[in-house]
Each structure stands twice: as C-alpha cells, then as structure tokens.
Image (tube, helix red, strand yellow):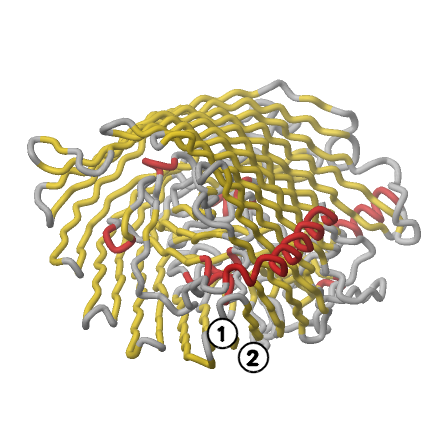
Amino acid sequence: MKTRTAGLSFAIATLLGASGPLYAQTAPSPSPSALLDEVVVTANKREEKLHDVAMSITAVGGDDLLHRQETGFNDFAAQVPGLSIEAVDAGRDRIVLRGQNVGSVGATIATTVDDIPFFMSGAQANGSFFSSDVDTFDLKRVEVLRGPQGTLYGAAAEGGLIKYVTNAPDPTRLEGAVYLGGETVDGGGTAGTAKGLINVPFWDGKAALRVSAVEEGLPGWIDNETTGQKDVNHGEKYSLRGSLLITPVDALTIRVTAFNQGLKVHGDNSVEVVGAAAAPSAPPANQYDLFNGYQHGSFVEHTIDNQLEYYALNVEYGFNAATLLSATSYGRIDHVFVDDVSDANLIPGVTYSEYLGGAVYGQPIIVAGNQHEFVHKFNQELRLTSKPGSTLFGHAFDWQGGAFFTRETTLLAQPFNAFSETATTVPLAPPLGGDNVAADYKETAFFADVTYHFSSAFDVELGGRSTLTQQNQQTSFTCCVLFGPADTTFPGLYSSQTSRTWSGAPRWHVNDDVLVYARVATGFRPGGPNLPTPTLPTPPAFKADSTRNYELGIRADVFDKAVTIDLAAYDIEWKDIQILEIVATPNGPNGINGNAGNARSSGVEWNFAWRPVSALTIQLLGAYTNAKLTVDAAGLNANSGDKLPYVPDVSSTLNVDYKWNAFANVTGFAGATWAYTGTRYSGFSPSAPIESHAKLPTYNALNLRLGLEGVHYSAEVFANNMTNSKGITEYENESGPNQTGLATFIQPRTIGIQLGAKF
C-alpha cells in the first residue's frame, strides 16, 4: 500500500507539471480565514444552511483543516465547543461530547463518513475506542453535532456525532493537487508527508473519478530507558480513497466509494511520571511531573497496528416530490496492540510481575498482552426525503422517513504471556492464558422526521425512531494461571432490546440574521450480553443507558454580518449508566459490564467570530461544562457529586487569521490558535484504591502558521505547541516501572513546512 500511495503522489505531481499551464486562469481557493461565509451542512440528512439548523453544530471546513495541520480529531477538537479527547496513544482515543464519559467500554459518540456509519454500535469489543479517526485530507468539512442524535443516527449517538463529509467527484472540471512537507519534534525525530488528489471527469460530464492519498511519517519523541532505543513512538500512516460518481440521467445519481487507512507505530505515547503507585490515597504534590524526561522503560515493544476500511454504494433517484436514497456500505476496523502490563499493581506497591514471578515462575518476569479488537460492519439504509416546495394545509412541510439495518461481527482477543527478562521471545510455562469474546450485533430501525412551517418565521421539527437490537456472544478462556486450569468455552448468550428515541425543535427566525431555537432530544447506547466468569457462567445482560437533552440556542449575524454569534445552553440527564465492574473469582478479578447510577451534564457553549476588516478574522469559542454523577455508583467506587472523567470544566480557543495581497495573484496568510484546557479528572476505577480519581492540571497550547498561496502554488511554515506545554490527556497514578505512574502528554513543540501545487 505504501508503494501504491507513493506512486499515486508521483503520478499526480507529474500530471500537475504537465497540465498546470493549461489552467492559468483558475481562481484561488477560499482563504483559511473565510469564517463568516455561508456554510451548508447535512446534519439532518438534508442540505441546510448551518445558520438555520435547530441544534448545536460546528462545521470545520476542509481549507481550515489543511492550513491548520488538523489531520485528525485530536487536532480539530479545539475548534469544537464541548468536545474533549481522552487520548491514550496514536491508535486509541475516547471522544467525549458535553461531558458524557464514565470510562465504560461502549461508545457514546457515533462517527460517520457521508452516509456510512463507521463505528462500533455494540460494546462487546471496547467500542468506546472505535471512533474512526479518518484523515481529514480532501474533506469538504467535518460536522460535529452535540447532544443526542438517536432519531436520525440511532444507537451509540446518545452524546453526539462526528460526521466526515468528503469531496464528491466533480463531473464539471479536471483538478488535482499535491502537498509535500515535513516536521520535526523538539527533542525527538523528523518525518515527512506526501498528499495528493486528482479529479477526472468523463462521459461528457456525466461521470467523474476522484482519488486522494496520504503517506505520512509520524515522528517520535519518547525514549526507552530499558533498551536504549530513541523515539520509540515513531510510526507511519497512509490513507487512500477512491470515489466514482455517475449520473446517467438527471434524476439518477450513483456513487461508489472505497477507502483504506493504515497506522502503525512502534511504541505508545505513555511516559513515566512521579505518580502515586505506592500510596494512591496520599499522592505527592508533584505526581504529574516527568520522572526522567519523556521516557518509558520496557522490555516489550509497544506496537500499535490499526486498519480502517470501508466500501459504499449510494444510489439516489429523484421523483417529482421526493428523493429516494439507498445507502449500502461495509466497514472494517481493526485494532492490534502489544502492551507491557508488568508494572501494573495488583495491590499498592506490588506489581503483577512481582507477584506472579515469585508465586508461579520463581524468577523475574515480564507480563505482556497482545490484544486484537475488530468490527466488521454491514449497513443498509433506505430513505425517502421530500424536495423543497412540499406543502401541507397550505404551509411548507419538510419530511423524511426510512429504515435502517446494520450487522456487526466483533472479536475481542486478549492473550497474556509471561517472559523471562533474559529471554523475551519465548513464553514461559504454564501460560498465563487469555480470553476471546466473539459477538454478533444486529440493529433494525425505522425512523421519521418532519418539519412544519407555520409561517416563514416559525416552524417545528419532530422526529422519532424505533430500534431493535439483537446480540449473540460467546466467550472462551484459555488456560492457565489467570483464567483457570483448562481451556473453557462458555455457552452462547443472547439479548434482545427495544429502544425508542425522539426529538422536537421549535425554531423562530426573528429576522434573516437572527435564529432562536429550542431542542429536546433523546439518545441511547445499547446494552448486551455480559462476559461470563468461572463463578458467574451465565451473567445477566446489561441494560441500555439513555440520555435526554434540553437545549436553548441563538445564532445571529450582526453589524452587517461582521460579527457572528452562536450560543447554546443545555442540560442533559443520563440514566442507567453503563460501567465496568470488577467481579472477584477464585482465579482473580474479572471485569463485566453493568449499570449503576445517573449523571447530569449542564453547560454553556459559545462560538463568536468578528471580522473588523475583510482581511482579519478573530474567533473565540469554548464551553463551560459541569458533568457529575447524581447517584452513587459503587461499581465505580464513585459517589454522587463526583466529576465525570476527562471533561474540562472550562475549555476555550482563540483563532486569529490575517490575509493580505503579497504580490501579483499571491495571497499571504498568518494565523495563531491558542487553546486552553481547564481542570479535569482522571478515570474512575473499580479497582480502587489502586487507582485514584485524580484532579489533572490545566494547560495551554499555542499554534502558529504563516504562508503564501497563489493560483497554483502554496507554501506554509507552522509551529504547533509553540510553548512546549506539557498537557496531560491520559493519566494513571501507577503502572510505570519502579512504582512510578504513566501519563500521556500532548506532542511537544513541532515545527514543519508544507508545500503545495494544484491545478
């Protein structure tokens, strides 16, 4: 695949050189600071002006993503009020919107690409870390919908939705681009990047093929003090997307898309900090300080290998009054990673390797896990949507309805091995054992959404969805030390649950420039069969949890559209929260899924933009979030009033973008992004007092960019995390060597360059 993407980049570069002069009059692309221009979104599965949508939504345009070097949701999260990321490493991230996080294994945020659901709806294989981090190159925009989206998007969208909108093939023009660049990390390595796209129309403007590719090196900055290796967390990423659009007649549109993305890194992003492993109830004041720089000692290479893949067929036919869409897709997400758990504590001050090495093997040992998680997902949606101009009783009436089916096949494989410190390739006997959870998830849903316009200024949207989820699961254990003296296969388990979600949103256009709306919406996350244990071979299924969101918002363009205001206040009730519980067995603790307690998240989100002159845009966005438990959750060792994990109380971002005419047809641009992340807490832990619910420090990050952009060529230099801030995105007060803790920090100061050519 690397050869293919590199070859594609070379082919695009060659084509650019050959074809560029033929298109000398092509207009330059929009500037990176065109924030106040009209934006069209598809949040409600129909095209609407963002200004008119009756919900909290942020759209980040493709040009902004490119100029700001925002290639994934860890990068663009600062551009979305209320969005936070629990970033574990390059391949594992938990997305949190409006504070919905207790650390459970099922996802609360859905991710889609166009009409492709691209995430794990069930919870059988750690779906909370299956939010697809699709590379943002050649995207039209990213839309982030905050609050429950259960009516139109179904299961696991109870907290919101991230929607990647790709650039469709364009039958009207030949175009292409290639971008080459590189970056270097302070105290770390250097890596290069190549990106390219080409759009080719044919069949007399009735068809087009669009192909885009990315080949990216990931520089490392963490050293392994045990082996002496430098920059062990370096890696490689590629992506390749091809899309064919055919319109044989005006009423019929057919689009076929294929996508493949791969990521491989040779070490995770965790480093040793002082921690509080030996005394978690009395942590030292410097527990978050680096223990010995950016280092993590281990005999095991912490490799991560992730694959994303999807294929989609969309067929759309326009009747006189409505448009019928058939969206068929297949997606595959694979996570494979190797982890060294030798230094995880069994009890404070005693690690698993120390205990097992003495009690079982009689020598110092390494305990390593080789985990494989995957989901294969088939989706089919049929949707009928009214065309503009539909009426009912003399008033405008927009409607859509449809049916949806998905089937997921998942696997969670967790084998553990013990190795001698002097022979790290041959597992010791007896084996530690492991577990395999194979599951099948089916979801069938029917939905409808209508908007009745009582007048040109006032309308009401109502929607509903009925969903049936059916799941089968079978668990097997392999012997011996951790999972029993013999291989065991448990009887298959089955669950069936029905959930209903609804939404309502009155909307008032005070005038053409001011919109006031209210929204009440519900969402759910499906329950399912549980993980059996030797002492509990047929555990009860865990229930679905649910959210109800109350929201009031205003959008306004004032002072002759020089200022935009987007402000929302919300209150979310979260019931029957799914949690990970620890069940004691004769062979040690095992985790199962359960339901415990309720939570509430309330807050305010803002997004203000000001263009004092046409060349300058200033944008201030952010959120205040108060997310906490409202009922004790004994399974989490948490109490009513405890803050939900990895949710900043305040987060805010300031963007300043300036452009000017540098010379001839070349525009200069300069920009800065300052992001503040407030107080957060680390995760709840059912294994307390080993792990604590720790209050994490605030941090700031400053990104700078400067460049030139012409009709055909562009050049940009950038500096991310200019102040070398040490912001924590994940923390454990134990699990590091010699009773240290582990933390993941944002990437240190990174300086780079990007050169582009296009036609």
Q: Is residue 720 left or right of residue 109?
A: right
Q: Is residue 720 visible?
A: no
Q: Is residue 110 left or right of residue 458?
A: right
Residue at image position (76%, 25%) is: 487
For the residue pair 167 and 152, the one nearer the viewer reads as 167
Instruction: State if disc 2 and disc 1 touch (CB < 8 Å).
Output: yes
Residue 280's place in the image compared with 517, above or below, is below
Image vertical order of residue 466 relative to residue 81, above or below:
above
Which residue lies under the disc numbered 1? 700
Q: Position of residue 226 (x, y in %)?
A: 83, 63
Q: Quadrant of residue 566?
A: bottom left
Label 2 packing within 10 angstroms: few (<14), some (14-19), many (20+) = few
Comes first in the chain, label 1 or label 2: 1
Q: Secondary structure at mark 2?
A: loop
**Residue 383: x and y, percent?**
34, 29
Q: Tag 1: Cα neighbours inside 10 Å, few (<14), some, or many (≥20)?
A: some
Q: Quadrant of the N terminus?
A: top right
Mark 1 lies on a secondary structure that is strand
x and y, in percent, of residue 305 in the image: 70, 46
In the displayed structure, 408 sits above or below 177; it is above
Which residue matches tag 2?
723
Please say if 681 is above or below 597: below
Instruction: Report the amino acid beneath label 2.
Output: Thr
